[in-house]
Amino acid sequence: MAKAFEGKVALVTGANRGLGLEVCRQLAKAGMEVIGTSRDEGEGRKALAPLGEKVRLEVLDVSDPKSVEALAERLRAAGVKLDVLVNNAGMSMKGFDVNVARRTTDVNFKGAMWVTDALLPLVKDGGRIVMVSSGMGSIGGVSAALGKRFLDPNIDRKTLVGLVDEFVEDVKRGDHEAKGWPSSAYRVSKIAMNTLARIVAKETASRHILVNAVCPGWVRTDMGGAHAPRDLETGGKSIVWAALLPDDGPTGGFFRDGVRQEW
Ligand code: NAP
């Protein structure tokens, strides 16, 4: 496997721990040059150093558009072109209120969108984009009426952002359940991320970029907890599968362990 991906370049967000770090390890093992990003420079350095020379660090807070733009500018200036972008950074907060709704959707959905938009010009034609989503992003998490709006084949990013902002506003007003939303910002953020995967897949089809959302399964990380059934290697593989797809691989889908999932 090693040689096929030699010289290819991948960027993985949220790489200082958990699945992001594991994905860096697996992509480097496959032969790629890997840029792992971390909010904290020291933590990122410490985490990535054992992975060897093929892996280097960039600082990035996906929820800060200035940080995202600064990263894109540094990569542009260095002439970096990406074969693979893995939008892995994510969070799940305790409790539920408007601040949790806003922060969670900002990091998990808008963060992935900002990173994708800023780095897309650096992704090579024929590249791969992976949205690390979750089974919690299943469309059944919202009412049938909302589900229909997310699944609209003609949905664009402005409408999608509007839907997510509507969720935050409904939470603020306290009528989100009556409007068909779950009391889980994480669920909504991942439904939006899945929708984003479909939108970006459509936009980049002419450039032959394969864009897919993946679920790593329930994995033992800080987020998944100690009782999750999956180890990091297995969860990481589910993500890496979409990063290493052959040229005739799928795009615009949702997969777990390489098996297509229902939206
Ligand atoms: P984790 O161990 O908690 O790691 C999360 C990573 O995301 C950390 O590197 C964290 O950095 C980073 N991150 C959080 N907010 C960020 C921000 N604003 N900007 C940049 N990086 C940020 O979680 P994990 O389990 O590895 O999760 C990775 C991805 O898999 C997430 O998208 C998650 O939703 C998804 N997922 C996980 C499971 C599971 O069972 N573990 C299941 C389904 C999906 P800091 O250290 O700076 O916070």
Image (cartoon, helix red, strand yellow):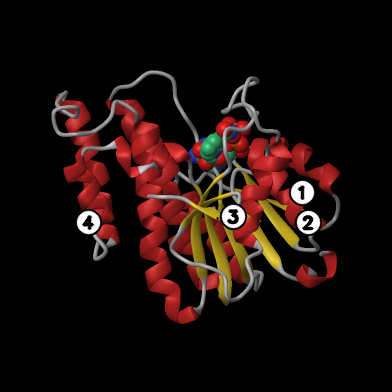
Q: Are marks 2 and 1 in contact (CB under 8 Å)?
A: yes
Up-down relation of residue 121 to residue 258 (above or below)? below
> Which mark identifies residue 25?
1
Compare marks 3 and 4 and give the one earlier in the sequence: 4
Compare marks 2 and 3 and give the one earlier in the sequence: 2
Q: How many residues crowd around disc 1 within 10 Å: few (fewer than 14), some, or many (20 or more)?
A: many
Element type where label 2 sits in the image: helix
**Residue 31 pos. (x, y %):** 81, 63
Q: What residue type is labelled 3?
A: Gly
Distance from disc 4 to disc 2, alpha carbons, whole Å, reads 37 Å
Up-down relation of residue 218 to residue 88 (above or below)? above
Distance from disc 1 to disc 3, alpha carbons, whole Å, reads 19 Å
Q: Which amino acid does label 4 sit on?
A: Thr
- How many labels sit on residues? 4
Left or right? Give the position of 261 relative to 249: left
Q: Mark 3 points at which residue?
A: 258
**Residue 165 pos. (x, y %):** 24, 43
Determine the residue positioned at 58% across, 42% down. Answer: 216
Mark toward the viewer: 1 or 3: 3
Q: What residue type is labelled 2?
A: Ala
Q: Label 3 CB, ligand 1: below 8 Å?
A: no
Q: Name the residue under label 4.
A: 159
Distance from disc 2 to disc 3, alpha carbons, whole Å, reads 20 Å
> Which mark identifies residue 76?
none
Determine the residue positioned at 16% across, 23% down. Answer: 174
**Residue 60 pos. (x, y %):** 57, 47
